[in-house]
Image (cartoon, helix red, strand yellow):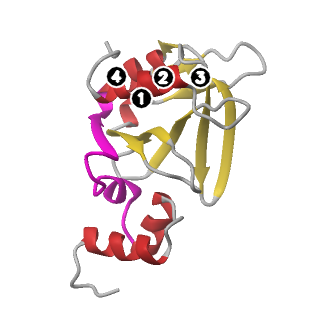
Amino acid sequence: MSSELTLSDRISELLASQPMVRPVEMARQLGVSEWEIVSQFGADEFVALPGLMAQSILESISDWGKVTTIIEVKGFVFEFKDAFPKGKLGFGYYNLQGGGGGLEGHLKLDAVTDIALLSRPLRGKETHAILFYAEDGACIFKIYLGRDDKGDIFTHQIAAFHALKEGQNVA
């Protein structure tokens, strides 16, 4: 790929040659941050929100039911498929209350600078995800809408996701 091409052009070339490539893989191949990749997608696929909305978004998602939370670090991918836990602020963190056996942890929400609402096919399936990014453009974690036993995305989650994209459902 020519270095004279814009990032958008380079992404288009990469997608033409590797249609199943994920944004994190595109970022590695093109030598840019994942945020730089997703922010190039069109308005039908990508909506940017400020990191300051992280807590209100997470509080909303905790009422959506089963979702898939993904943390990917240096090629290792951790997935948790269940309801995203409610949390509460304490000691500078948003502390997840998994209730024994569920997802638990301590989120440093002030490290979230940008949030992407992403709607793109992944491995040939419709997907919708909320991605939380750090200042360096690296993805901290992702929350994908959940699927039923047939592999279909829960319709109430699609509606809630689209409401979030339109600025509704978030305090």
Q: Residue at x 40, y 22 (%)?
A: 57
Sequence-first tag of 3 and 2:
3
Amino acid type at circle 3 is Phe
- Point out the stretch of residues depicted in magenta: 31-52
Kindly indicate whether the residue at mark 1 contacts the one at mark 2 (C-beta within 8 angstroms). Answer: yes
Q: Tag 2's secondary structure?
A: strand
Q: Which residue is mark 2?
A: 93
Sequence-first tag of 3 and 4:
3
Report, in whole angstroms, how far the alpha carbon at label 3 lies from the one at label 4: 18 Å
Kindly report which numbered mark, 2 or 4, lies closer to the viewer in this rendering.
4
Residue 47 is inside the magenta segment: yes
Amino acid type at circle 1 is Leu
Kindly indicate whether the residue at mark 4 contacts the one at mark 1 (C-beta within 8 angstroms). Answer: no
| Nearer to me, 100 or 147 | 147
**Relative to 66, does residue 88 appear above or below in the rendering?**
above
Q: Which residue is mark 3?
A: 84
Report, in whole angstroms, how far the alpha carbon at label 3 lies from the one at label 1: 15 Å
Kindly indicate whether the residue at mark 4 contacts the one at mark 2 (C-beta within 8 angstroms). Answer: no
Q: Which residue is mark 1?
A: 109
Amino acid type at circle 4 is Ala
Q: Tag 1's secondary structure?
A: helix
Amino acid type at circle 2 is Tyr
Q: Which residue is mark 4?
A: 163
Q: Residue at x 49, y 68 (%)?
A: 19
Q: Quadrant of residue 64?
A: top right
Report, in whole angstroms, how far the alpha carbon at label 1 lies from the one at label 4: 22 Å
Report x, y in % for residue 117.
Answer: 37, 38
Kindly report which numbered mark, 3 or 4, lies closer to the viewer in this rendering.
4
Q: Tag 3's secondary structure?
A: loop
Report x, y in % for residue 12.
Answer: 34, 71
Q: Residue at x 34, y 22 (%)?
A: 163
